[in-house]
Image (cartoon, rainbow, N blue to C red):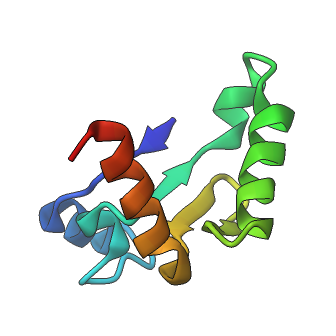
Amino acid sequence: MTSLVRSAEHQYRLRRLGYAAMLPSGHCLGYSVDVELAWFERFGARDTLAELLLARQESGELNVIDEGQAWHLCLAPTARRRLRRAYEAEMGI
């Protein structure tokens, strides 16, 4: 499943369980997510999703880290302004 924005409390819980959950974290700010590709594989979508994510990495929009059970995705710092402008244009802001 996909883990979206996390609270600091959840980060501390993950640390107590032995995960490398740092504070501050991009997870707490909404800049990063973990995607469990095995979940998508059950529905036949894993390969398509992986291709899309790797293409976004190649285009410089995302950083993708294969952590085994999940892929850690975070917004590429160099893409932030461009993606923000595209979002605001789409939303009419």
Residue at position x 38%, y 40% in the image? 90
Residue 62 lies left or right of residue 3; in this view the side is right
Residue 86 position within the rendered picture, expressed as x and y whole percent measured from the top left: 44, 53
Relative to 48, say whether 20 is above or below: below
Residue 56 position within the rendered picture, expressed as x and y whole percent measured from the top left: 71, 58
The number of numbered discs placed on residues in the rendered structure image is: 0
Residue at position x 17%, y 60% in the image? 7
Hey, which quadrant is residue 13 in on the image?
bottom left
Front-most of residues 78 and 86:
86
- Residue 19 seen in render: no
Residue at position x 84%, y 45% in the image? 51
Residue 91 lies left or right of residue 62; in this view the side is left
Q: Residue lying furthest top in this view?
A: 43
Residue 33 position within the rendered picture, expressed as x and y whole percent measured from the top left: 46, 56
Hey, which quadrant is residue 52 in on the image?
top right
Front-most of residues 6 and 79:
79
Residue 67 position within the rendered picture, expressed as x and y whole percent measured from the top left: 68, 66
Relative to 53, say whether 11 is above or below: below
Residue at position x 48%, y 68% in the image? 82
Residue 25 lies left or right of residue 72; in this view the side is left
- Residue 71 seen in render: yes
Relative to 34, say whether 14 is above or below: below
